[in-house]
Image: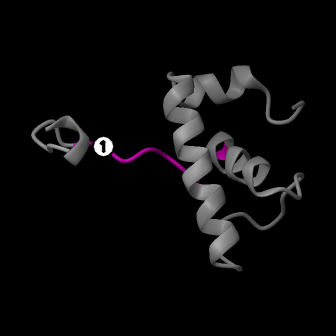
Amino acid sequence: MLYPSVDKLKAKIDSKYSLVSLASKRARQMQEHQNTEQLEAYRSYKYVGKALEEVVVGALTPKAQDASTVYEDEI
């Protein structure tokens, strides 16, 4: 993957795991619900690439998680 560069992505989101999780969820959302694009033009034609482009420009950011939330797999 040449664009966007990993350095630019790491400047926006410090964790590679968080980046992959965020981009995959957004790519799935774009695939299931057409015409949900947040940018006017994309360089990439694949959904994951589009999601990463949204991260670079700041249109896609991770949600803050509440520390008191208990997930089913943590029980």
Left or right: residue 19 compared with residue 41? left
Overall secondary structure of the magenta section: loop
Residue 37 in view of the camera = no
> Based on the displayed image, in which of its 4 quarters is residue 71 positioned?
top left
Q: Residue at x 84, y 63 (%)?
A: 41
Q: Which of the 4 image quadrants contains residue 67?
A: top left
Quarter in which the N terminus is drawn: top right
Q: Which residues are magenta?
A: 57-65
For label 1, the residue is 64
The location of residue 11, given as percent across then percent down, is 59, 23
Q: Position of residue 51 (x, y in %)?
A: 68, 51
Front residue of 49 and 38: 49
Instruction: Report x, y in % for residue 8.
Output: 70, 26
Magenta residue check for 63: yes
Residue 2 left/right relative to 60: right
Residue 56 is situated, as x and y percent measured from the top left of the image, at 67, 40
